[in-house]
Amino acid sequence: MWASLGWFALGLLLLALGGDSIVKGAAGLSRRLGFSPFVAGLVLVTIATSLPELAVNLHAVGRGETGLALGNAVGSNVVNIGLTLGAAAVAAPLLVRWRALSPLLGFLLAGTVVVALLGLDGTLSRIEGIGLVVSFVAVLAFDLTRRREEAPELRAEIEAYTETRGGLGLNLIRFAIAAALLYYGARYVVDGALGLGPAWGMNPLLLGLLPVAIGTALPEVAAAIAAARRGQGDMVLGHVVGASLFNLLVVVGGMAVLRPLPVPESFVRLEWPAAFVFALMLVPMLRGDLRLGRREGGILLAAFVGWVLLEWWVIRH
């Protein structure tokens, strides 16, 4: 077991380093290629934090471990809202000025319901997967069309996300390093998790749902807390909502495109509703003052702990 735990921890470290490297490389290349800093920043804010999860899921699907991949994709959404956003709001109240985040949250709620309904027959087909990926492209296009409505301060904050040093050669090197780190990080995480499964009494689905989803989120939790303390509430919530949409539509949809994705009946009854409830909790919290305070953060953290305990109880029974 200890060897598997060591490989798992090493994989998480490599994924964190790879995710940071690919964001810096993409930011630098976007500027070199003449893309709008705001557009590039908006895309990176939306998808950057999900790249390690995507690498893990691609490796898991390639090995036929679709249960682990599905658990990680949906579990990451619960972790994003309950742990990452909750911890950030407890560290410092989050003031949200990003107008497009409200409709994006609505898309996340609607998408969670749609994917759950599609999984009622026990499988997500390739056609359904293609529809989910196309839906994400449409949501991202909608977000980009509203960029002129955002406050100048927010635009500057998002544009600053693409600021990085180095020329074309350095950013290409960053991409190459990131590809290697993400590949081996995903490989070690999947191998380590599967090795831990028998010792912890977890099947692949629950491995992806709990240790893998939580482990891959830890670097983002630290980054979210630091951003909250700098007063960047928009960036924190933007990462969380954007990453959750990406996981739901691109990661889950992409897995179904690669091969029809089995969806266990128990997953539709418990995990999908949990992901929906966590997203739904944000609606009353953000309504009115568009602010997440320490009290709301504490509620999210308490709900997250309750969810983990419930899943652990299900494992034992």
Image: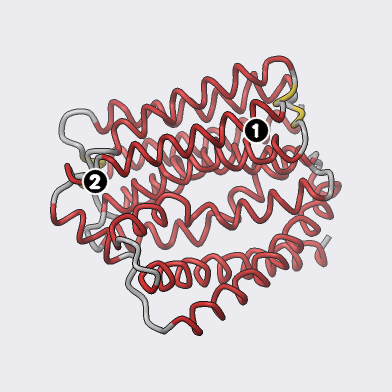
- Which residue type does callout 1 highlight? Glu
Is 239 situated above or below 21? above
Using the image, tell me which numbered label, if any, was put on residue 147. Answer: 2
Is 299 situated above or below 283? below
Report the quarter where the N terminus lies.
Answer: bottom right
Q: Of helix, strand and loop, which one carries label 2?
A: helix
Q: Position of residue 76 (x, y in %)?
A: 56, 43
Picture residue at 31% right of the left edge, 27% below the top: 283
Q: Position of residue 171 (x, y in %)?
A: 49, 78
Q: Quadrant of residue 36?
A: bottom left
Whole-angstrom CA distance, mark 2 to mark 1, is 40 Å
Q: As drawn, is 123 to the left or to the right of 136?
A: right
Q: Which is more N-terminal, label 1 or label 2? A: 2
**Looking at this view, is 44 or 89 the one in front?**
44
Dot 1 alpha-carbon crowd within 10 angstroms: few under 14, some 14 to 19, many 20 or more: some
Is 224 situated above or below 93? below
- Which residue type does callout 2 highlight? Arg
Q: Position of residue 28 (x, y in %)?
A: 41, 73
Q: Of helix, strand and loop, which one carries label 1?
A: helix
Picture residue at 75% right of the left edge, 54% below the top: 59
Using the image, tell me which numbered label, if any, was put on residue 311. Answer: 1
Query: Which tag is nearer the camera, tag 2 or tag 1?
Result: 2
